[in-house]
Image (cartoon, helix red, strand yellow):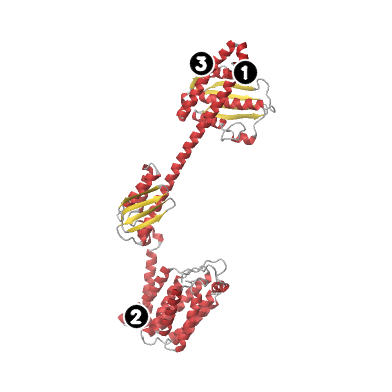
Amino acid sequence: MDGRPSEHPTLGASLGSRFTRRHALRLLGASLLVLHAVVWLGPEFPLARALLLAHLGLFLIWQPIWRADASISAQDLAVFTLFTAALLLMLDWWLLSGWLVLLIGLVAGTTSGARHGRLAHLLTLAFLLSALLIRAVPRAFDLPPLPEPLDPIFSSALPLLALAVLLLPGGAQRGDPPREVDLLRALNAALVTVVLALGSLLGMYHWGLGYVDALVRCLLAIAALLLLTSWVLTPRLGLNSVLGLWERSLLNIGTPFERWLDHVAGMVASQPSARSLLEAGAAALAALPWASGARWEGAGVQGQVGEDTTHSIEVPTADFSMRIYARQRPGPMLRLHAMLLVRVLAHFYRAKLGEEALAIATHLQAVHETGARVTHDIKNLLQTLEPLAAALGPGESGRHPERALAQLGRSLPEITRRLAVAVARLEGPAQTADRQWLPASRWWAQTRARYHDRRVRFEGDPVGEVPLPGELFDNAVDNLLDNALRKAADGADALPDGGIVVALVAVPAGWKLSVTDAGEPIAPELADRLLRAPVPSRTGLGVGLYQCMRLATQCGYQLALTSNQRGRVRFELTPLA
């Protein structure tokens, strides 16, 4: 019987499963009552066999191993039929004692979350132990009759325990988890019961005691042993307890776990890529004392180190599959240990992949930002070339050739310089801003020459050779004036002549540049993001001021919107203190 529910359960199977879950305690109590009758009558009575068949039927309905709607294979049905026939045909006190031990282990290993369910299991264990130790074992070994009070107690008190289980309220409700059997706990309970029974018999023959006295002594000895074992295994003693030592031994099978963690962490720091980390980790696994080689395979990675053997442990992970070849057949604990080691390696491998992806994304972002800045530079250069081209046109150059040549002479060096800056930025974006420092008077004169006929008023007259970061100030004044002039050209926000003011003032830490226009204020939701992130733009990428702010930070300056009122919108570029 595979224990799995059938894919298409019938209505009867579904109702049977629901009935079993809701009335499990009543079925258990009825089964115990019938079993008590079998034990009280004895296997020699023919009626006992019929009652045992009824008990087996009730037990089959109650048992927690298979669900009522589970599919039954022919092999499982044949095994259960043979077991039932052998128990009925060959029934004696030995078989009955073995059946009671089996029931004790099954009930002790069954988990129950409800309070009434736990109480029912305790009462059932008391019933089964009493039936085994007081009735079945003495009859199986042909012991002298028990003292007079025990038989009446057995015949009258044990049915009360079964009735108590039968009358306990409650059952499994809708949504409760199904009952499970802990095989290890069931086996331990059955073994302790067998030790108790055999220990009582050995004590009786060894010390020359009566069966009841030997049983009491054996009970006390086993209780003391269990109490001592529980105290030694308690987690309150920390790593010095037997349980702590056992847990550490499970982690350290084959190699100390702490050493493996340190080794993998060292490989993460020393290996340049995730691929090399995986190769080094596989080599470290193959170098373990119990391993002879390792083979890995994943998305774009595969390889092998060491030698193949007939014994191997395969550990699949989300990114790769690792097969470790062992020198000998690995046991269950060694398999768990190998799985733990590989999962630790897989965790660091995934982190290394994340580092590589982040490095690629950072590089692409730097390329994108550099391209955006170069795009703005080219756009600003085109704006500078527009009035120059107009001045050199057929009409203007013919009327004022000297002025056109003078303007060309002033503009070409600046255009050449800014093109050189753009090319240098493409070659080495991180160092460009540090190389372009110009005298403030020279930069101021070049900027005034570029915008002398663009309705921009310049205030200030810097003198001396105190330098300023030319690329930063070019970027700032071009972006700010471009936005102000475009706003003035929209028509809805026309500015008077001189409505845009550019001022350059010396401050203790350097130079302060301000650009003020007399137009409408910037929308509050746009002003909050203007210098911190790219913003939507109808005429470009919307990254001009954002790039300018990043460049200002690199040069030790700060760009800020200091005034956002009607008729007074001001940006200031100031050095950081």
Residue under label 1: 453
Which three-letter amino acid code belongs to the residue tagged 2? Leu
Query: In terms of sequence position, does the residue under pointer 1 or pointer 2 come before the other?
Result: 2
Residue 157 shows up from this direction = no
CA distance separating discs 1 and 2 = 118 Å
State whether residue 513 is above or below residue 2. Answer: above
* Number of other residues with Cα within 10 Å of mark 2, as a class: few under 14, some 14 to 19, many 20 or more: many
Please tell me in which quadrant of the rendered image residue 405 appears. top right
Q: Nearer the viewer, residue 434 or 249?
A: 434
CA distance separating discs 3 and 1 = 26 Å
Residue under label 2: 201
Residue under label 3: 464
The residue that appears at 64% across and 30% down in the rendered structure is 564
Q: CB atoms at circles 2 and 3 under 8 Å apart?
A: no
Please tell me in which quadrant of the rendered image residue 91 appears. bottom left
In the picture, measured across the screen, residue 400 lies left or right of residue 82, that is right
State whether residue 389 is above or below residue 200. Answer: above
